[in-house]
Image: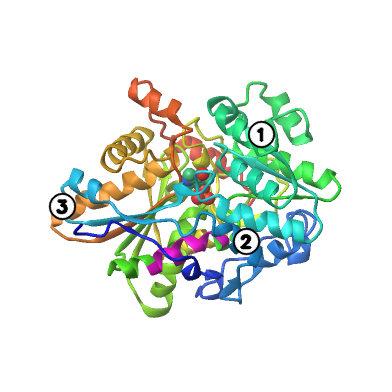
Amino acid sequence: MSKQKRFFLQEDQIPTQWYNIQADMVTKPMPPLNPATKQPLKPEDLYPIFAEELSRQELDQTHQWIDIPDAVREMYAYYRSTPLVRAYGLEKALDTPAHIYFKNESVSPVGSHKLNSALPQAYYCKQQGVTNITTETGAGQWGCALSYAAKVFGLEAAVYQVKISYEQKPYRRSIMQTYGAQVTASPSMSTRAGKDILTREPNCQGSLGTAISEAIELALNTPNCKYTLGSVLSHVALHQTIIGLEAEKQMEMAGEYPDTIIACFGGGSNFAGIAFPFMRHNILEGKTTRFIAAEPASCPKLTRGVFQYDFGDEAGYTPLLPMFTLGHNFMPANIHAGGLRYHGAGVIVSQLLKDKYMEAVDIKQLDSFEAGMLFSRAEGIIPAPESCHAIAATINEAKRCKETGESKVILFNLSGHGLIDMSAYDQYLSGSLQNYVVSDEDVQRNISQLEKVI
Ligand SMILES: *Cc1c(COP(=O)(O)O)cnc(C)c1O
């Protein structure tokens, strides 16, 4: 055996703290606002919806490192560290001088990075005596992770799944039910938010924004129940930094440091997870790694949205968040990367993009699947449709290296596998998939409806 292909950490080398980039940011994110008073939120304001510890983590701009609770570390150890893999197969297929690495988060029991935050969220709820948790899910990845985490810590889970995904990805529903969760297609008639939208639009296929409204409403109306969210929020980004902290040690084992780091982008959690631990060296030590978020061309909040205060959900139940957004009424096309169909972006990544610590590219649906096919054939792993966006962006960078002859070190996050998404691959293979690109009018119309807060 000549060259080492996979890099693992021993159990006792797995990081014991998460990294809070807010502490190191030169320009801190602006505060979330109470929509009624327009006053900055305090952690206590979030307690009705979220577990208290998560509310504190959400607004923590001072502590650089946060201890991972022992009970969470115990559960992480069942699947972490995840492998860092040198993608020799992909390099060869592209005939590129680039060194391509990927962090394989698809090996978690539920098949994606989402479990990294589901476990601590369920744990902190349990710890304060909560009995029930609610959430929304798009493609079902977050719903699966949360359903399992709820079971681990002895909580009841109720999941609103975006209707289009409920129908496109029936096995994700079965997985959630296997873990013991109650699953409802959203929009549903079980909440006011759901009824409102179904009255306006009886055939509505749903969106993450609507499903979030329904889950929050259920949490507010159920005793001893909290809401949880799988992306967008700063505490989710915090938990996901376990990915990059491991990768940092693993890249060191490989004897390299990334020039470019790439992840797909829905609300920003897997991007934050792989990027932030490395970005701290850009901020604190002047390293010059490039960070690229790959979003779908059908939901281009980073590349074509505005930086504005907006709601995180369709009905306007959430605080106002300062973020890149397409407007909370934006209804993304029915692409298969359900986890990327979200109108906004987390407040930390939004500030970092505004301050040019990172870049964003948009990827068309067909290009994402073409990249997924190439990767499957070169590396054997069938990527989630979301992850295909990161692979497409990686391939673009690797091809650029071929043109310039540079052996750049590229690290991307493989956020999940696509084995439950084969109907999407089927459609790609049969030629029935299409591209969706949003028109400028559509972007402008939704953005112009936003209330100007700043
Ligand atoms: C949810 C999901 C995403 C998108 O969410 P982020 O918070 O942006 O990471 C990406 N990939 C997979 C596999 C997912 O399940």
Residue 94 placed where, x, y %? 19, 45
- SS type, badge 1: helix
Asked if the residue at tag 1 contacts the one at tag 3, i.e. Cβ–Cβ closer than 8 Å, the answer is no
Q: Which of marks 3 and 1 is nearer the N terminus?
A: 1
Residue 135's place in the image compared with 81, above or below, is above
Q: Give the range drawn in magenta.
A: 239-249
Q: Real-space Cα distance between discs 2 and 1?
A: 23 Å
Q: Name the residue under label 3.
A: 402
Badge 2 amino acid? Val
Residue 270 placed where, x, y %? 48, 54
Q: Real-space Cα distance between discs 3 and 1?
A: 47 Å
Q: Mark 1 points at which residue?
A: 177
Badge 1 amino acid? Gln
Q: Is residue 171 left or right of residue 55?
A: left
Q: Tell me the residue at 63%/48% (across/down).
A: 312
Q: Name the residue under label 2.
A: 72
Residue 274's place in the image compared with 385, above or below, is below
Query: Ligand 1 within 8 A of label 1's CB?
Result: no
Q: Which residue is at the far front?
A: 1
| Depth check, front residue: 198 or 337 | 337
Q: Tell me the residue at 70%/41% (across/down).
A: 213
Q: Which of marks 2 and 3 is nearer the N terminus?
A: 2
Task: Indicate which label's residue lies in the foreground, 2 or 3.
Answer: 2
Q: Is residue 246 magenta?
A: yes
Residue 187 placed where, x, y %? 68, 30
Name the image quarter holding the C terminus.
bottom right
Q: Label 2 neighbourhood size at 10 Å, few (<14), some (14-19), many (20+)?
A: some
Q: Label 1 neighbourhood size at 10 Å, few (<14), some (14-19), many (20+)?
A: some
Badge 3 amino acid? Lys
